[in-house]
Amino acid sequence: MKNGFTITQRNAVVEQHLWCIDTIMAQYAAFMQTEPVDPDDVYQSLAVRLIRAVNSYDPRKGYLKEYILSQLKREMVRIRSTQAVYGLTQAPANIGSTIVPLTIAAQRESYWETYIAV
């Protein structure tokens, strides 16, 4: 750890900053209501990012609270990504509105299997 915290100290710092997760989730409440994400999964991802942020915090580079909040915002951006929401890699950012189930693709196109990336 860059900051010299022991595991016990790190855990105490993480517990003191759990409110940051609630703050970020409140800021992204509209996203949470419109996208198919489970709030518990989002909270868990943010909690892991909080632990990593406390581990990697370097006191010479600024305040802990600011660093934690910026890291949690980055995690929300990652959660909002197409890959995280739909499990797709190398997909365009706006693909969420164009996803079609394979059953419908098979009905529309007899060669639908040729369109699936392997």
Image: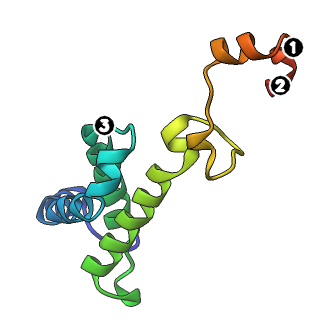
> x, y (%) of residue 101?
61, 20
Q: Which mark, residue 38?
A: 3
Q: Which numbered disc flags the more N-terminal residue, 3 or 2? A: 3
Q: For this rendering, which residue is in front, 61 or 116?
A: 116
* Spatial CA span between label 2 and label 1: 8 Å
Q: Residues within 10 Å of mark 3 (few under 14, many from 20)?
A: few
Picture residue at 71% right of the left edge, 18% below the top: 105
Tell me the quadrant of the picture where the N terminus can be found: bottom left
Q: Which is in the foreground here, disc 3 or disc 1?
A: 1
* Spatial CA span between label 3 and label 1: 35 Å
Determine whether, in the image, residue 96 is placed left or right of residue 30.
right
Picture residue at 61% right of the left edge, 33% below the top: 99
* Spatial CA span between label 3 and label 2: 30 Å
> x, y (%) of residue 52?
38, 58
Q: Which is in the foreground here, disc 3 or disc 2?
A: 2
Q: Amino acid at mark 2?
A: Tyr
> x, y (%) of residue 115?
83, 25
**Mark 2 lies on residue:** 115
Q: For this rendering, which residue is in front, 114 or 22?
A: 114
> x, y (%) of residue 33?
29, 46
Asked which colour scheme the image uses, the reply is: rainbow
Q: Amino acid at mark 3?
A: Asp
Looking at the image, can residue 1 be seen?
no
Q: Is residue 6 above or below residue 99?
A: below
Picture residue at 31% right of the left edge, 71% below the top: 68
Dot 3 and dot 2 residues touching (CB under 8 Å)? no
Q: Secondary structure at mark 2?
A: helix
**Mark 1 lies on residue:** 111
Q: For this rendering, which residue is in front, 100 or 5?
A: 100
Picture residue at 14% right of the left edge, 61% below the top: 12
Q: Is residue 49 above or below residue 109?
A: below
